[in-house]
Amino acid sequence: MHNHAFERQCAAEESRHTAATAPIRNPRLALFALALGTFAIGTGEFGSNGILQLFSSGLDVSIPVATYAITAYAFGVMIGSPAITLLAARVNRRTLLLGLIVLFLAGNALSAVAPNIALLMLFRFVAGSVQGAFFGAGAVVAAYVYGPGRGGKAFATVMGGLTVATIVGSPLGTFIGQHAGWRALYWTVVGIGLAAGAALVAWLPRTDDLRGGSVAGELAALRRGTVWLMVAVASLGISSIFAVYTFIGPFVTDAAGRDASLIPVALAVFGVGMAVGNHLGGRTADRYPNRGLIAGYVGVLALLVVIGVAGSDPRVLLPCLFGVGATMMYAIPTIQVRLTGFAPDAPTLMGALNLAALNLANSLGAIGGAITIGLGWGTLSTVWAGFMLTSAGLLLYLTTIARPGSESVQSGSLASSASTVPVVGREV
């Protein structure tokens, strides 16, 4: 719903700040710096999965115990990121991003020298606590750069670094870990993070328009039922992407009967689909409050059925992997725009909650898939777990948020609510 009082306040603030706001000298470079930051974060996150066996052996623990480090990272995103966002509510978003990149560097550098699994878990939690807060603050800054009405595209730009990490960063990091030791992955991530930090310092705009808001305003957003409904819709619906991505290796070798050398190709195909869907989804989210999410969820449900029935044929499996990545990422910018529309006074926290929801979806999808395999239903049965979870998310959305007539109600965008102050329109 439109918040007319908030909009009038924004208009008044904009008239006061427009003259004093310095133009952004290099808007495209500012956006690149944000994407480079999320690329570094994604490389560390996804690359860790690729070296699981390596640090299991290096730290002399079993693989199930080693997975605790992966889980600790997810808990960092789900718990640490919202906490940091609240504690730093008043901090200028540029300053916050620079502080987060320092914390990210520390978490990964300490991960590289961790002497045991307990400390590695702690350091992965620290690194994970950066992710949601960085995406939330980054989306606010990107929205400022793009200008009003382009919040979906802004969030898609920030997410773009993460999708590229699935295509390039994760395979490269895994390769480095396999040939130079698992600790080398985290040092590589530190190197990318340093480059991202330098880019952020050089190219992010310095302006009071990116100042923070009050802690009370951020907390008030958590009392809105629509925010938690949207988090539930995201957690359930997006889980199917992980019910597939987590098991791509077994899909290729067990279900399709192909050599393991095809796994990197399958991962790359999935990642390219994510990149395409993210780009298109950002544009859709800025125009329609419901269409991106509904089309994305319905599309992935159809593809899951195809994989479940005929996914043992690589000629079917690979195009469907592209499609699953594309359709799910097509929905995610709409989730961010809707969340920020429900809490325009807390855009950074909404970004952190969105990433927290995606990490919960990661757990739900992986656990659901593991259960179906454990029941003896076969490798491809994981898609049916994803089908049930996404169906539940779509049903919840259709019956609570996407009510008849809501297409005519424009969802609040990141661009119109960055840090509770307006942004000056910019053409990028």
Image (spheres, rainbow, N blue to C red):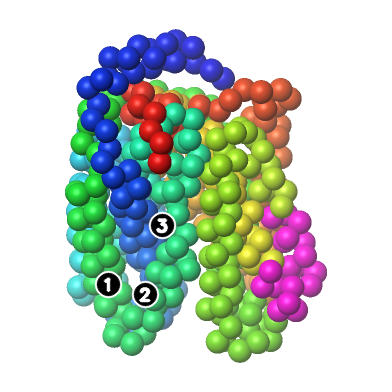
For label 1, count other residues whose C-alpha is less than 10 Å away and answer few (under 14), some (14-19) or many (20+): many
Q: Residue visible at 56% across and 20% down?
A: 1
* Res 315 quadrant in image: bottom right
Q: Is residue 121 left or right of residue 226?
A: left
Q: Amino acid at mark 1?
A: Thr
Tag 2, which secondary structure?
Answer: helix
349 is within the stretch colored magenta: no
Quadrant in which the C terminus appears: top left
Percent position (x, y) of residue 150?
Answer: 48, 35
CA–CA distance between discs 3 and 1?
16 Å
304 is within the stretch colored magenta: yes
CA–CA distance between discs 1 and 2?
7 Å
Tag 1, which secondary structure?
Answer: helix
Instruction: In the rendered structure, find residue 161 and report the number of the disc placed on it.
Output: 3
Residue 164 appearing in the image: yes
Instruction: In the rendered structure, find residue 391 and report the number of the disc placed on it.
Output: none
Q: Amino acid at mark 2?
A: Gly
Q: Which residue is mark 1?
A: 188
Q: Residue visible at 76% across and 56% down?
A: 302
Q: Residue furthest right?
A: 309
Percent position (x, y) of residue 326?
Answer: 61, 57
Percent position (x, y) of residue 98?
Answer: 21, 47
Q: Is residue 330 left or right of residue 128?
A: right
* Nearer to us in this view, 156 or 129: 156
Q: Which residues are magenta?
A: 300-319
Q: Which residue is mark 2?
A: 173
